Image (spheres, grey):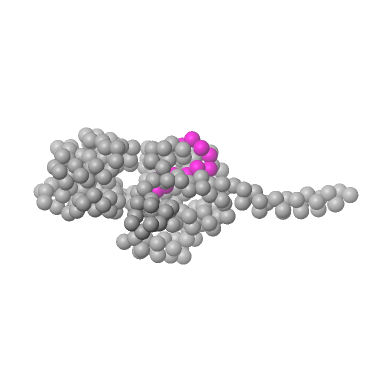
Amino acid sequence: MNNFYNIIYLLTALLLAPCSVQAQVIYLKTEHYPPYNIDLSLNDSGESGIGGASAEIVLEMIRRSGYRHELELLPWKRAYRLAETEVYTGVFSTTRTEAREDVFKWVGPIADNNYVLFTMQDRNIILNDINAAKKYSVGAYQGSAGEGLMREAKIPIELVPRDHLNALKLQRNRIDLWVSGNLYGPYLAKQYGVTNLKEVYTVRKAQMYVAFNKSTPNVVINKLNNILQTMREEGFFNRVYDRYK
């Protein structure tokens, strides 16, 4: 009789195991941050949804994991806050900084993203170290890692609620320098007719991740990191990013 109940227990466990994986939902939050995360409805192609190099990598990772997911495009501060407060929730593409290290659990890296100081090509600004930026006006995006890096370096900054405003201010001589991503900055500026940017100083070489709520179980974090490692080894990352260069 005991053997009978043991068999029933094992069969029940086997039947329920796949369901438990499928039942788990991963909540992913992101912002429009091209070319990493792109709100496709803003393009002229008539597409909808969320694209971009990082989004492609993250969605393939989740597909391989077997977890269900919900992907939502939000303003950055709200997306970040949800990842801070809600279990199984991750926000991307998030720069992993010292200040953020213990706030989240990390899956990645999913992309390289260096933070640099830009000026216009026709301006004779040369920086040999970060302290030299103190004699210039520097624009930053409120709540961004760039803002945090400038504050760490004790560089006075002018904040804006939308990063493209920094590009316009730079073009109109309202600021001297703009701290932004080495790929994102020029991409964003071009959308608003601002070209001829040049990099004058690399503030920090950085990588971007999916930042998950601290209460997300380690088994989930480890599984997703292992999948990403396999994708890297397969050349999946290189194939994706080659299409966005």
Q: Is residue 238 left or right of residue 190?
A: right
Residue drawn 19% across the image and 53% down it: 195
Q: Position of residue 124 (x, y in %)?
A: 10, 48
The relative height of residue 71 versus residue 157 in the rendered view (above or below) is below
Residue occupying the point 40% across, 65% down: 239
Image x and y of residue 209, in percent: 42, 49
Quarter holding the C terminus is bottom left
Residue ID at (20%, 51%): 194
Residue at 17 percent of width and 54 percent of height:
196
How many numbered discs, if any? 0
Towards the viewer: 25 or 210: 25
92 is higher (above) or lower (below) than 86: below
Picture coordinates of residue 28, whole percent (x, y):
48, 46
Nearest the camera: 244 or 6? 244
Whether residue 207 can be seen here: no
Q: Is residue 181 left or right of residue 227?
A: left
Q: Nearer the viewer, residue 143 or 163?
A: 163
Question: In the visual, does 110 lie left or right of 157?
Answer: right
Q: Which range is magenta?
A: 84-94
Q: Is residue 22 visible?
A: yes
Q: Is residue 45 left or right of residue 62?
A: left
Image x and y of residue 223, in percent: 54, 52
**Residue 223 magenta:** no
> 158 or 70, which is in the foreground?
70
Tell me if residue 92 is in the magenta stretch: yes
